Amino acid sequence: MTQNLSDAVTANQDVSKPDSGVRRTRLREFQAQLVERMQAAQRGEFVQVNQLGIMVGQVRYLLELRESGEIVSASSLTTVPLTKDWYVGLANIRGNLTSVVDLPRYQGRDMTQLDSSCRIVAFASVLAFNSGLLVSQVLGLRNIAEMEEVTSPEDTSDIPAWVQSQYRDREGNVWYKLSLAALVQDQGFLQIGL
C-alpha cells in the first residue's frame, strides 16, 4: 500500500511538471515571435498591420510594435512618495529604472487592480522615455487589417490626442489605437509630482 501511495504521488508530480514546462515553452515562443516582429518593424520590413493588443483596466488598446518595448511581470514595483496616484512607481527592467503609469487612473477612472496577470509594457528605446504602462493583460498580436475602423464621433473633446483611432474586431470588441509617442508629449503625463 505504501508503494502504491508513493507511485501515485510521483505520478502526480510528473503530471504537473510538463504543464509548467509547456507554459514556459509557449511564453518563450511568444516572446521570440514578438521580438522578431518588433525587429522587422524597426527595419521597415513589416507592414504596419500587426499591433500588440493589451487590456488596460477594462479597455482594449492596440500599440505599434515599434513603440512598445519589453513586457515584464508587474510583481516588483517600488512606490515613490509625493507623486500622483496614477504614478504606480519604479520597476527595474534589465538594470534600467522605469517609471510605471496606471493609464485608467491617469484618465480619472478606477485604478488597475494589481494581480498575477498584470504586466508592464515598457516604452521602446526609440521614444527615449524610460516609462511603461501597467496593463491588466497582454492579449497578443492583432491584425488591424482584419478589423473595421470606427468613424469618429462628432464630439471628440473627451478623446485624448494619444488615442489615434478606434477599431471593432469580428467579435464586436472595440479597440483603441494608442500612440505612446503622443502620450509622452502630453504635459499632464510628464507632471508626476504632487
Image (cartoon, helix red, strand yellow):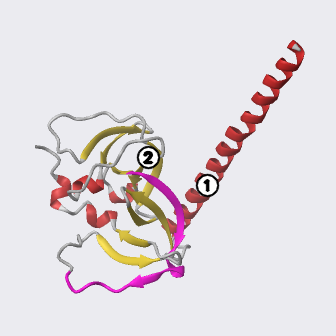
Residue 66 position in % (x across, y down): 44, 64
Residue 107 position in % (x across, y down): 22, 59
Front one among 24 and 31: 24
Would residue 58 appear left or right of 186 to someone viewing this image? Answer: right
Would residue 92 appear left or right of 187 to someone viewing this image? Answer: right
Residue 147 position in % (x across, y down): 49, 80
Front one among 185 and 40: 185
Q: Tell me where residue 45 sits by quadrant.
A: bottom right
Q: Is residue 56 above or below residue 81?
A: below
The verdict on residue 149 being magenta is yes
- The residue type indicated by label 1 comes to Phe
- The residue type indicated by label 2 comes to Cys
Would residue 9 appear left or right of 138 to someone viewing this image? Answer: right
Estimate how packed mark 1 is, as few (under 14), some (14 to 19) or many (20 or more) residues with alpha carbons within 10 Å.
some
Callout 1: SS: helix
Query: What's the mark number on residue 30?
Result: 1
Q: Residue at x 20, y 62 (%)?
A: 186
Would residue 160 appear left or right of 41 to someone viewing this image? Answer: left
The region drawn magenta spans 135-155
Q: What residue does disc 2 label?
A: 118
Residue 17 position in % (x across, y down): 73, 34
- Give the mark nearest the N terminus, 2 or 1: 1
Callout 2: SS: loop
